[in-house]
Amino acid sequence: MTTSIGPVPVLHTGFSTPGAVATPWADVERILDDAEMFWLSTVRADGSPHVCPLPAMWWDGALYFVTGSEEQKAVNLARDPRCVLTTGSNEYLRGHDVTVEGSAERCTDRAVLETLARMWESRLDWPYDVDDAGFRHRTEGRAPNPDAASLPVFGVRPVKVLSFSRGDEFAQTRYRP
């Protein structure tokens, strides 16, 4: 998906209030950019779902997140990179939820990692150092921690995005590249 013009929104009239209009892509991008927490859904080897909350950053048309190499989500993604990231509100009559479907790819581009590390620190006060394999946590006092394990950073470029707005009108909108 591109961030300059964006994909064309298509309203799903069967799940929308009569007369509702599709949510513009710019509104969805703003939600993705402003959100601090997402729910990551992956699939275990036995086919059962695994869902967990984590912070993610929307940058350059992709959602990025960090995890430990041994964590269940990383194990699942190593076997099957398909996943869904969801953000939004837990209120029924108001709010706006967005789901991003795609495949997680390991990010090792140092320039991208440097940008993402700055974003994590400025937005969440969560400092990371960058190495060739991803991020490293800093020690107490925020000094670099050479003993910390390198944490993989994954990016998900959307293949499908769904937007669910609630309020005076309910509108379900779908976006594809």
Image (spheres, rainbow, N blue to C red):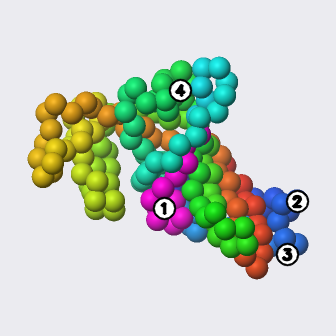
- Of the residues under marks 2 and 4, which one precedes in the sequence? 2
Label 2: element kind: helix
Q: Is residue 117 left or right of residue 28?
A: left
Give the extent of the magenta segment. 30-41
Q: CA distance from mark 1 to mark 4?
A: 24 Å
Crowding around mark 3 (Cα neighbors within 10 Å: few <14, some 14 to 19, many 20+) is few
The residue carrying mark 4 is: 76
Residue at the image position 59 percent from the left and 25 percent from the top = 44
- Secondary structure at numbered mark 1: loop
Say whether disc 1 or disc 2 marks the residue closer to the N-terminus: 2
Please identify, in this view, whether the residue under mark 1 or under mark 2 is nearer the observer: 1
- Residue where numbered disc 1 is placed: 35
Query: What separation in Å lies between label 3 and label 1 (alpha carbons)?
Result: 28 Å
Coordinates of residue 55 in the picture (x, y in percent): 43, 51
Identify residue for label 3: 19
Are discs 4 and 3 less than 8 Å apart at CB?
no
Query: Left or right of 173: which side holds 3?
Result: left
In space, the residues marked 2 and 4 are separated at their CA atoms by 34 Å
Camera-side mark, 3 or 1: 1
Does residue 43 lie above or below 26 as drawn?
A: above
From this viewpoint, is residue 132 visible?
A: yes
The circle on residue 116 is: none
What type is the residue that disc 3 sits on?
A: Gly
Q: Quick one: label 1 or label 4, which is nearer the N terminus?
A: 1
Q: Nearer the viewer, mark 4 or mark 3?
A: 4
- What residue is disc 2 on? 14
Residue 137 forms part of the magenta stretch: no
